[in-house]
Image: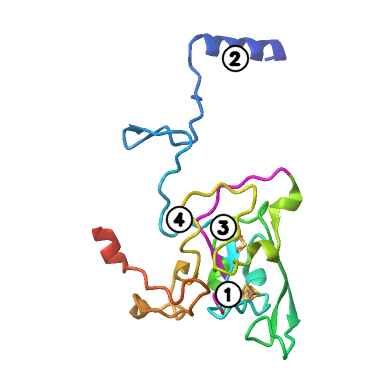
Amino acid sequence: MGYLGGFLVTVRQHGKRNRVTTEYSGGRMFRRGKKESHDEKVEKPERLHGRHVLNRYEDGMEKCIGCELCAGVCPAKCIYVRGKDNDPANPTSPGERFGFVYEINYLRCIHCDMCVEACPTEAITETKLFEFSFTNRRDAIYTKSELLVDDAGKPQHLPWEDWRPGEDLHTSGWMRATSPSGDADFEGVVSWSGELGYGVRAAEADQAEADRR
Ligand code: SF4
Ligand code: SF4
């Protein structure tokens, strides 16, 4: 079939109203039988994996120790870390080293959370923030200064990110999928450190309780 024949098939399909696509609604127009505004966001699952943050301890020190485990485990190879020795007189982190350079390329990240699971200090976690679009490659590569939480312990709101109230909460250690030991006996037991602006978070409800809700 030549080019013209293919074109005629398309015209005939169009005439029969056999189109398989419908008006794009962003998946939000009809949910649970209710028409929603284009500007409303649907409720997010508790463990949604959005863009990352680099966390700090309650005293303001950075949790990242520049060990590069997150970069090593990342299947998309989208993390770049370079550690540097702390200045003993004015350390950035409690460890021997800190994350001097830290970058995540969001053109490649698949939000698998492996970096979060691998991190020994809960420095890197994923937020529920995922509505962001870039117009250039530079913006897509988040740098350490963009990923590090602010002095109130909250993610930094970058100009191209669409935030709604409350979405900057719950960005820390409790987002881990497993206990550090991988043992179910630790379910419900807090086993992570406190965070700047939040302190120590409560443990999540166990799965059985979550199912009953
Ligand atoms: S979420 Fe997955 S793909 Fe994204 S930076 Fe972490 S390990 Fe890499
Ligand atoms: S974020 Fe965690 S795993 Fe990655 S370099 Fe820092 S301390 Fe290591």
Q: Nearer the viewer, mark 3 or mark 1?
A: 1
Residue hosting label 3? 111
Pointer 4: what residue?
A: 166
**Is 56 on the left or on the right of 165, as rendered?**
right
Q: Do the residues labelled 2 and 4 touch (CB within 8 Å)?
A: no
Whether residue 124 appears in magenta in the rendering, the answer is: yes
Residue topped by disc 2: 10
The one nearer the camera, 12 or 23, is: 23
Which label's residue is closer to the chain start, 2 or 1?
2
**Separation of marks 1 and 4 at Cα, in angstroms:** 20 Å
Q: Where is ligand 1, by quadrant? A: bottom right
Q: How far apart are marks 3 and 1 (CA)?
A: 21 Å
Q: Which of marks 3 and 1 is nearer the N terminus?
A: 1
Give the residue type that dot 1 points to.
Answer: Arg
**Helix, strand or loop status at disc 2:** helix
Q: Is mark 3 on a helix, strand or loop?
A: loop
Dominant SS of magenta comes to loop
Task: Tell me which numbered mark, 3 or 4, is placed earlier along the sequence.
Answer: 3
- Amino acid carrying mark 4 in the image: Gly
The x and y percentages for residue 143 are 71, 62
Measuring from the top left, give residue 88's x and y in whole percent.
Answer: 72, 91
The disc label shown at residue 56, or none: 1
User: Over which residues does the magenta segment extend?
Assistant: 121-135
Judging depth in this view, the residue of 134 and 90 nearest the camera is 90
**Mark 2 or 1, closer to the camera:** 1
* Earlier sequence position, callout 1 versus callout 4: 1
At horizontal 57% and vertical 73% (from top left) the residue drawn is 118
Label 2 is placed on what type of residue? Answer: Thr
**Would you say the residues marked 2 and 1 are in contact, meaning their CB atoms lie under 8 Å apart?**
no
Q: What residue type is labelled 3?
A: His
